[in-house]
Image (spheres, rainbow, N blue to C red):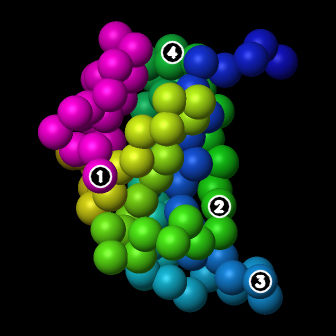
Amino acid sequence: MEKPDFHILVCNSFRLSGEPQGTCHKKGAPSLLQYLESEIADRGINAMVSSTGCLKACDKGPVMLVYPQGWWYGGLDQAKLDTILDALESGAPAESLLI
């Protein structure tokens, strides 16, 4: 596997028991994950997406983090993901959406 330019971590609110319980899960993070994977493939962005446990930013959920850049985004929906992916295509953050 080629090392990705971006590793995108998407909070899915999993707790130690393995059950999704938190804000990100309840606000649709699972469907955003699927959309994100599809868009990355369609756009040819060299990125890997991982679902995570709670990222401890519940008041901003659903949230995601882009590594190694350390860009945090919150209040995600498909339109915001499109804006973020547009920026990633140029190697930059979507400044207006950073938290």
Tell whether position 37 is magenta. Answer: no
First in residue order: circle 1 vs circle 3: 3
**Residue 16 image label:** 3
Q: Secondary structure at mark 1?
A: loop
Q: Is residue 18 above or below residue 8?
A: below
In front: mark 4 or mark 3?
Answer: 3
Dot label at residue 52: 2
Q: Is residue 46 visible?
A: yes
Q: Quadrant of residue 82?
A: top left
Taking the spot 53% from the left edge, 54% from the top edge, the residue there is 10
Which residue is at the far right? 1
User: Which label belongs to residue 99?
Assistant: 1
Residues at badges 2 and 1 in contact (C-beta under 8 Å)? no
- Residue 24 is labelled as none
Is any atom of residue 28 visible in this view? Answer: no
Residue 70, image x and y in percent?
Answer: 49, 38
Q: Residue at x 36, y 69 (%)?
A: 61
Identified by mark 4, the residue type is: Gly
What residue sits 50% from the left and 29% below the top? 69
The residue indicated by pointer 4 is 44
Q: Tag 3 or tag 4, which sits nearer the N-term?
A: 3
Circles 2 and 4 in contact, beta carbons < 8 Å: no
Q: CA distance from mark 3 to mark 2?
A: 11 Å
* Mark 2 or 1, nearer chain start: 2
Closer to viewer: mark 4 or mark 1? 1
Q: Is residue 48 left or right of residue 93?
A: right
**Above or below 99: residue 57:** below
